[in-house]
Amino acid sequence: MVKETSTTRSSGRPSVAESLVEKIFAGRYQPGDFVPKEIDLCEQFALNRSAVRSDLRRLVDAGIIERISGYGSRVRDYSEWNILDPQVTAWMARFATPNPGIQREILAFRLDVEPYVAMTAAKRATARDLVAIEEAFEGMGQDLRSAGAAKHGRPQRGRLHNECDVAFHVAIFKATHNIVWTQLSHILRPSIHLLVETSNVSASDPEDSLERHRRLMECIRTRRPRDAFFASVAVLEGTASALGIEMPETLLGEIPEAIGP
């Protein structure tokens, strides 16, 4: 059989990189584990060695695996991954849902960052920013009410709710009017969506979750930075509870006194 190259590969077949990264994100290959050797991947995917090496290079460049001469390719620790690389965040959104370890890492990052972002937004948000936050919140509520009416029971959140939930958090990042936070919100969108989508499916208290978002919105609207900080924490505590993840250790509550009320 003539082995395919990366340019002649069937468009419907997942690449070596995508196949491996799906297994890595799902936890089938843990940090420290070796992935299959090149020759085995060539046989499995009916590809030549050059094509396989090219795909493995994508994972090396993303910081997900490292090549060890004479041994093969080993999965690196999560802390070594280029987690803000657009390709990595895209893979994360597609493949990381079953992996509680990655979910915990994302949640820990959000807990260390988003309360301070919310606090800054409460000081800097313009009328336009507040409209964007409110529109996203109203979209969440509308979807929840529609789902509840359709099912005649406990409302279940759908795709529109997830999209509006992500938009809500992104709008708060933008309301800081800091170019780094604003750009970071675009990069983080897939990872935020990962937690939002997963937690919204498993949450048992969708109405309570909506209320936590409302309180955060009100704290920002009424210019209460400290309250916005803790309202953001409460939102993320709800996410942790829905995911069944213990709250990671962070510096929560360590707000400098100079920040003011």
Image: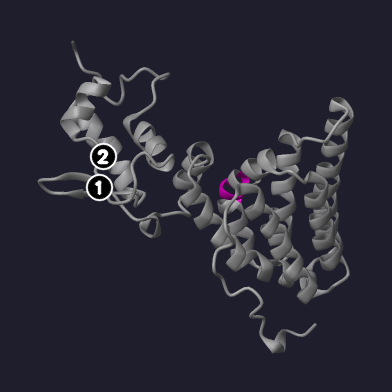
- Report if the CB atoms under discs 2 and 1 are less than 8 Å apart: yes
Query: Could you tell whether 86 is left or right of 260 in the image?
Result: left
The residue positioned 58% from the left and 75% from the top of the image is 251
Q: Residue at x 71, y 41 (%)?
A: 163
Q: Disc 1 residue type? A: Arg
Q: Identify residue for label 2.
A: 35
Q: Is residue 2 left or right of residue 233?
A: left
For the C terminus, the image quarter is: bottom right
Res 234 seen here: yes
How far across and how far down the image is residue 242, in percent?
A: 66, 48
* Magenta stretch in the rendered image: 189-193
Name the spot of residue 146 as percent of width and height, x first.
87, 32
How packed mark 2 is, by other alpha carbons closer than 10 Å (few <14, some 14-19, many 20 or more), is: some
Give the vertical position of 238 relative to 199 (above or below): below
Hey, which residue is sitting farthest bottom in the picture? 258
Per the rendering, the mark at residue 74 is 1
Decide whether the magenta segment is chiefly helix, strand or loop.
Answer: helix
Q: Amino acid at mark 2?
A: Val
Residue located at (87% from left, 39% from top): 142
Decide: is 249 above or below 155. below
* Camera-side residue of 220 and 141: 141
Residue 61 badge:
none
> What is the quadrant of residue 56 in the picture?
top left
Q: Depth check: give the residue in front, 65 or 55.
A: 65
SS at circle 2: loop
Q: Is residue 147 left or right of residue 94?
A: right
* Mark 2 / mark 1, whichever is N-terminal: 2
Tell which residue pokes out farthest to the left in this image: 70
Quadrant in the picture for residue 55: top left
Which element carries disc 1, helix, strand or loop? strand
